[in-house]
Image (tube, rainbow, N blue to C red):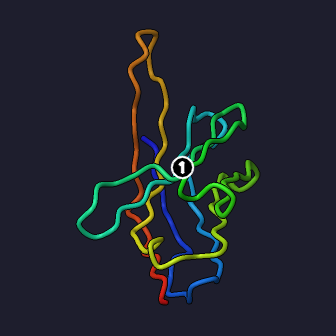
Amino acid sequence: QVQLAESGGGLVQAGGSLRLSCAVSRNIFNIDVMSWYRQAPGRQRELVALIRNSGSTNYADTVRGRFSISRDGTKNTMYLQINSLKPEDTAVYYCNAEKVVNVEGTKATHWGQGTQVTVSS
C-alpha cells in the first residue's frame, strides 16, 4: 500500500507561484508513474503532469511551460512547481502513484487527499 500526502496549496494572486509537494510512503523509484491531477468545481479530474520511473515527463498543453514536475529520491517526495498562475488554475490538486503489480500488467493506483490551490484575479 502506498500512502500519498500533498501539501503546499494556498491562496495566491494571478501571476504568482506555488510549489506543491507529495510525500510518498515508500521508495519513490519503485513507483512506475507519479502524476499530478487537478479537479476544478463542476469539472472532471484532469491530468496535469507526470513523471515516469525513467525520469521522462509529460505535461498537459494548458500548463506546459508554466508547470514543472520533479522528484527527490532522498526525501521520497514529488513536486509540482507552478509559475505564472492564472485564475483558471484554481482547483484541488491531487497526487497519484501508479505501479504495475503483476506480469499481466495489472496496475495499482493510489491517490492523495488533495491540496487546494486558489488563484485570485
Vertical placement of residue 27 versus 62, above or below? above
Identified at 67% across, 37% down, the residue is 29
Q: Amino acid at mark 1?
A: Ala
Hey, which quadrant is residue 39 in on the image? bottom left
Q: Going 57% across and 35% down the picture, which residue do you hit?
A: 31
Q: Note whether 48 is above or below 40 in the view shown.
A: above
| In this rendering, position of residue 15 left or right of residue 90 | right
- Tell which residue pokes out farthest to the left in this image: 42
Q: Position of residue 35 (x, y in %)?
A: 53, 47
Q: Residue at x 47, y 79 (%)?
A: 87
Residue 34 versus residue 23: which sits nearer the camera?
34
- Disc 1: which residue: 60
Residue 32 pos. (x, y %): 57, 32
Secondary structure beneath disc 1?
Answer: loop
Locate the N terminus by quadrant.
top left
Depicted 47 relative to depicted 89: above or below: above
* Residue 75 picture quarter: bottom right
